Structure formats: structure tokens, C-alpha cells
Amino acid sequence: MRQGMKTLRSALVMMVAVPLVALAGEPTPAANKQPAKASEQPAKASEADCHHPPQAQDAAPKSDWKLTRGEPIKGVPCVKLADLLAKPQEHDGKTVLIEGHVRKACERKGCWMELATAKDAKGAGLRVTFKDYGFFVPLDSAGSEARVEGVVKVADLSEDRAKHYESEGAIVPRTADGKPREVQLVASGVELRR
């Protein structure tokens, strides 16, 4: 009886141990371990204030590329970015096509980008977010040329939201009384080129 129990115990140990050893593979010496990639490291506390869930992002190629996100651009009326920024109330709530230079993009999630009329344009731009947060852009989209189709919105921001955007390098315009207000476009489709 005792011999039968030892045999059974040995058989059970082997049934568990062999697959675990096979799954573990060869151990890597500590000296050869590579540091974890930034995407594998735990999120920093300062990133916790970004209100969007994390999404894996691939870096965009450095030149000669075209990237599309969201729905295909349908060809709604094109509005010049300078005209939109000068008179945003005329376009509030309308679907438009805008072309511009990506001056800045969210470097934490790719959840927004800021369009300007030129690479060196100063002052407020157009903040582009993405419909239902269904897609994002590469983290290094700044420097790209963009065609964006979506709905224009003139939005009052909370002070916290404005500080969040400014902490990521965005330019947040303010009204005469100092309140943050910006022109936004909720994009249904985006094309980026370099």
C-alpha cells in the first residue's frame, strides 16, 4: 500500500512538473537580462491624469508614409484652418474637412493632436480628438501633415483639463477673463502624411 502511494505521488508530481519545466524554457542569467521596455513598465503616477485608457501605439515611420485612422474621408466641404480659427462660431456643430500641420500630439496615449496652419505657427491651434475614442494616432505624429474630417466644437475647458493639455505641451487659448476655451474637432477620419 505504501509503495502504491509513493508511485501515485511520483506520477502526480511528474504530471505537473514536466509541463511547467517545458513552459519555463531555459533560465536567463541575471547578467543577460534586458531592462523592460518602456511599454512594459508600470504606468507612472503622472500619467494617471490622462482620462483615456491606455492603447498600444506603434511609432510612425520617419518619412514617406501615409497613415489613415477611423472612417475614410468622405469629401465634405473643406474649410481653411485659418478661417475656422478666426470665426469658429460659424462652423460650430458642422462637419468639415480641415488640412493642417500637426504641431503637437498627446505623447502619453495618442488621444489628441493639435493642428496649426504652418510648422512654425504661434498661437492657438485646433485640438483634434477622435470620435468615441475609437482610434488614436501614433505618439510621434507631431511634424506630420493632416487631413481631418469631423464635427467642429467650440468648448469651454475645465482648469484641470487645460492644465493637463498644457503639461503635454499644448497651447490652450483663454478668453479675456482667463477661462480656457478652444476650438475642437471630433474627427471621424484622419489621414497623416510625412
Image (cartoon, helix red, strand yellow):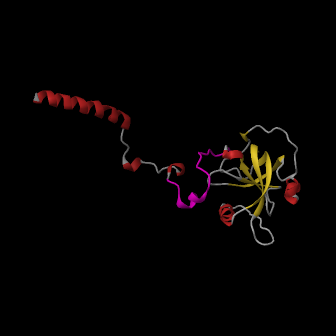
Residue sitting at x 88%, y 49%: 79
Q: Nearer the viewer, residue 2 or 36?
A: 2
- Residue occupying image coordinates x 72% and y 40%: 70
Query: Which quarter shows the N terminus?
Result: top left
Q: Position of residue 184 (x, y in %)?
A: 77, 55
User: At 61% from the left edge and 57% from the top edge, which residue is drawn?
Assistant: 50
Residue 37 magenta: no
Q: Main secondary structure of the magenta part?
A: loop
On whether residue 54 falls in the magenta region, the answer is yes
Q: Quadrant of residue 46?
A: bottom right
What range of the chain is rendered magenta?
42-61
- The answer to which image quadrant residue 26 occupies is top left
In percent of width and height, residue 38 lies at 53, 52
Query: Which picture quadrant has residue 191?
Result: top right
Residue 74 image offset from top left, x and y in percent? 82, 38
**Is residue 30 among what the camera can see?**
yes
133 relative position to 192: left or right: left
